[in-house]
Amino acid sequence: MQVTIQYSGQLKLAVGCASEQLELPEGATVDELVRALAQRHDNGARRFFVDEAGNTQPTLMLVVNNRQVPAGTRQTLADGDEVMLLQPISGG
Amino acid sequence: MNRPLAPLTDEERAIYEWQIWVRDFGEEGQQRLKNASVMISRCGGLGGVVAYELAAAGVGKLVLAHGGCARPSDLNRQLLVTYESLGRPRIETMTRRLLDLNPRLEIVAVGENVNEDNAARLVEQADVVVDCAPMFEERLAMNRQAVLQRKPLVECAMFDLEATITTVQPGNTPCLACWCPSVPPTWKRQFPVFGAVSGTVGCLGAMEAIKLIAGFGQPLFNRMLRLDLRDMTTQTVSLVRNPNCAVCGSLPRA
Ligand SMILES: [Zn+2]
């Protein structure tokens, strides 16, 4: 199945694109998606996706079809899903 | 906010005439603003515009926290800072600029940024908090106190030409820590942004505060509005409370 990834903020600059498509095995979860992205962007952007143990960064907001997926939720993805990855931003 | 409301003077009725005409707001809404207090964490590019709009709208009291002295790199977005005030404490210029606009305004000016030690006292003085700080340490301290004291908190943020805004109502909506439990390890203190971006989010934040105080419209509860001014697109993300949130997870619904 294929999902569309959209990046925001710092993440967009770190991976070098605003969006991309990713082929995933049927029934893949959001955490599996994040690990696949960490691997794909291993040079430079890895720490945006996963912590040192290889788990999803707790501050990475995952949004599937405009709905936030809370950290630790085992949500599976479906073909055609749009996944937005939001890095928290701030003021100043 | 159930205390008796001080009435408007004739001068105030004249000044706020155009907004008193707003549907669902009216003279009672204006009275609520007059009797309300808003705490703004940092009055820079973002919070300075929140403060200016709230001063213009006739909010009675502003509690402002902002440390440090004005620097040249403030001037592209920190509209309360002036060229003349470079090198001087920002909070002094900010206070003066706001009183120039609205001399009836009561200002509690604190020349330091929010931290774990002062957050409780600052939030205690406010009915609504607007968080515009750059450091996540400040934002998380402010969020913790807003949740503890059950005060609504408007979360405004920006980066490059992007912006996000959501409003926390402790117990009923996710708090900041529900989706940002710690300082993001990749965050940098200085980042690209235009003053027109901080000003846009600042105006949205001020509107949220006005609606919360006057009790009309639909604030951004359980929703995050995302703007990308580069291509002028908007997106509304549904937010979910994290039952394991260390800050609000055990808070019952209000
Ligand atoms: Zn929370």
Image (cartoon, grey):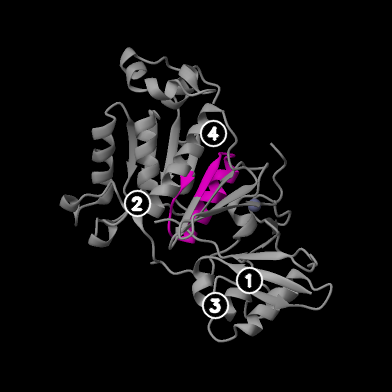
Q: Which residue is mark 3?
A: A15
Question: Are tags 2 and 1 found on a single chain?
Answer: no
Q: Mark 3 against mark 1, which lies toward the viewer?
A: 3
Task: Name the spot of residue A26 as percent of width and height, x first.
Answer: 84, 75
User: What's under tag 2, amino acid-wise?
Assistant: Gly
Residue drawn at (59%, 45%) of the image: B147
Do residues under tags 4 and 3 come within 8 Å of each other at their CB atoms?
no
Q: Which residue is mark 1?
A: A57
Residue drawn at (37%, 40%) of the image: B51
User: What's under tag 4, amino acid-wise?
Assistant: Leu
Question: Are tags 4 and 3 found on a single chain?
Answer: no
Residue range (magenta):
B130-155
Q: Earlier in the sequence, mark 4 or mark 2?
A: 2
Residue A71: image quadrant is bottom right
Along the line of sight, the residue nearer the viewer: B145 or B71: B71
As helix, strand or loop, the secondary structure at mark 1 comes to loop
B217 relative to A36 in the view: left or right:
left
Q: Residue furthest right?
A: A27
Task: Name the spot of residue B53 as percent of width and height, x first.
Answer: 37, 37
Specify whether residue B140 is painted magenta. yes
Residue B74: image quadrant is bottom left
Q: Which residue is mark 2?
A: B44
Res B206 visible: yes
Q: Is mark 4 within 8 Å of ligand 1?
A: no
User: What's under tag 3, amino acid-wise?
Assistant: Val
Q: Residues under labels 4 and 3: Cα distance?
A: 38 Å
Q: Which residue is mark 4?
A: B212
Question: Are tags 4 and 1 found on a single chain?
Answer: no
**Neighbourhood count class around disc 3 (C-alpha, 10 Å): few under 14, some 14–19, many 20 upward:** some
